[in-house]
Image (cartoon, grey):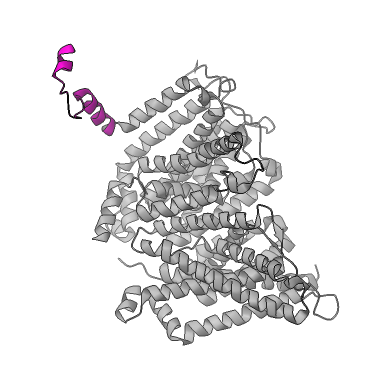
Amino acid sequence: MSERDAVRPVRGRRPGPLWSRTRRWLRRHWDLAALVLLAVAPAVVPALGGALGGQVTIVFISCILALGLNVMVGSTGLVHLGIAAFFGIGAFCHAILTVPTEPFRWSFLPAAALSVVVTAGVGLALGAPTLRLRGDYLAIVTLGFGEVVKVSLRNLEQVTGGMKGLNPVPPPAAGLRLGGVDLGMQFAVDPRWFYALALVTLAVVVVALRRLERSRLGRAWMAVREDELAAAATGISASRVKLSAFALSSALAGLAGCLYAACLSTTADPNAYDFNRSVMVLCAVILGGLGSIPGTLVGVALLVGFDTVLAPWADAAIQQSGINPGGSMLLSFSGWRLALFGFVLVLVMRLKPAGLMPSRRMAAELREARA
Amino acid sequence: MSTEILLQQCLIGLANGALVALVALGYTMVYGIVRLINFAHGDLVMLGACLALSLVEFTGLTAAGPVTTWIGIAGLVLACGLCCGSLNVLVDRVVYRPLRGAPKLAPLVSAIGVSFIFMNVGLFWIGPADRSFPPLVPATNLLAGDRLQFTARDLLVVAIVVPLMVALTVLVRATPLGRAMRAVAQDPVAATLMGVDVERVIAATFFLGGFLGGAASVVHGLTITTIGFQMGFLNGLYAFTAAVLGGIGSVPGAVVGGLVIGLVRALSSLLVGERWTGAVVFGILIVILVFRPEGLLGRRTVDKV
């Protein structure tokens, strides 16, 4: 060791071999590094055991939701403005199956599994008749469907609890059992287990979607996105491919909904699943870079993180600092929240129209279009 | 249920539908020319309503006599129309125009961003709570007898909406600008080759759409009588639905779509209850689009390779 230290040049900024090797590794495996970092964080940062942990968990869940949307909008090129409806169906379905006031009282895993199947089925039921609609018309149908679902959730009080929503959604009780072995996860005692559950689910979803991206089906999605007629001419059944994207996207949104309800221990009121959420998730996907998995994650981290983590923190900080004794809106962070949000969307689209981290294919296409 | 109640709801529906149609025209014209779902349009109308409220408070129009009031309302329509139109052109110039060659969804996200900015401006302008708009026009019945209500407010809607629509139709059908607009909507490249200044046509379209939105904002304030910084979203949603229902890009389609939406809303609040209105409207929209994907009056387009 000492010899190697002696060889190191005195001047010059050339980093040592260890650092350059680390950097190369990081560039290739940044995802793994991020996962390890996020997994270790709750053990190191005590704040993650409190409110902050819950907020970050919501960001993870939103990532799953956005990845589901990305399958439709990014990979297959179908504009979807009602993803929050499927998020809501998942959450309410899970709640109906688990809440003690309803007759089922299933435990977490079977309830989540059935909810995912149900949302996928609803996605198929909406997708099948609307497949022949072109771009913007499909967007409107999904938007309309989102409104129908929201209104129904609000008005079917006997089933959904109306504006109060359903609660308490029990946590995955006494730990998840895996092959009869109790993993000893005390969700009710330590909220960090929710953090872990959401993170692990997110990691599994990311890995699965990556493999899917390179599979026959993933390539078919992209072919349909690029040119439906040409894809059909090469023997791809466009309607089947689109339907599968519809179903998978809905299923992932449903999965996110289950986790959401379980983490909050309530479905919250149906307005939590309105158009605003759909738009927020769509913006995150486009902002990050359509069709790119890391882009989607970055987009969600930025937008949802801004809303659920940064905004409450900044508001509390301003209040504590005493700048704003009268409680004026002009001096509070949340007073400016919408405008900030809007400026970020406009600026990013202006400077990077393909998103922050576009997939290679999208970036190449854009260059071609410019040339 | 008596015929009178049904007829009454139809009247209410048509009056509301005319308002929806006015906003829908802003969506459909912009979409027809640049293929952009202008998500900020509903919030533009909201800003127009804020301006109208401030103008009414500033000029003290509430205390004026009947003749002055009607002249004042005409002035409001003009002022809000001009402001909203100019603002729309400005936004197009600054935000959408640099994105003309960008991926299809980039302008859409920008429009969502603009709508957030507008909402924030509205929030600072009139505050977070709903404000009531001074009732310049009384809700007195103009029909003899009390079995059917057709109020002065309904008359106001008709008096503002119908002339505007006639003027718009004449403009699109019979002027050089209208011909240029139709040409650009059909094929921008061919229009350029024929010597049409496409950017000017686009600016004119944004101005006209914004003008109609501004006029709609005054009508909204005077007939619905409450405004709030979040009103843009739902109004925009219904108007946009009307535009799609009629066939987006088609001017008469937007009018028909608006009237249909107004009627459906009025009748469904009568038949299945107010709280299901949203579900009924959008359910009908989905069904119509499934069976007639190009909308009621839209033209069927063929996919090109």
Q: Position of residue A243 (x, y in %)?
A: 42, 50
Examine the rendered structure and indicate whether residue A66 appears above or below residue B17: above
What quarter of the picture does the C terminus of chain A occupy? bottom left
Residue for point 52% across, 25% down:
A47
Q: Residue furthest top?
A: A2
Residue for point 40% across, 40% down:
A298
Residue A179 is left or right of residue A241, and the answer is right
What quarter of the picture does the N terminus of chain A occupy? top left
Q: Nearer the viewer, residue B9 or A367?
A: A367
Q: Position of residue B302 (x, y in %)?
A: 37, 70
Residue range corresponding to the magenta coloring: A1-27
Query: Visible in this render: residue B295?
Result: no
Query: Visible in this render: residue A40?
Result: yes
Q: Position of residue A254 (x, y in %)?
A: 51, 40
Examine the rendered structure and indicate whether residue B255 appears above or below residue A293: below
Q: Position of residue A248 (x, y in %)?
A: 43, 43
Examine the rendered structure and indicate whether residue A128 appears above or below residue B305: above
Q: Could you say which quadrant of the image residue B256 lies in?
A: bottom right
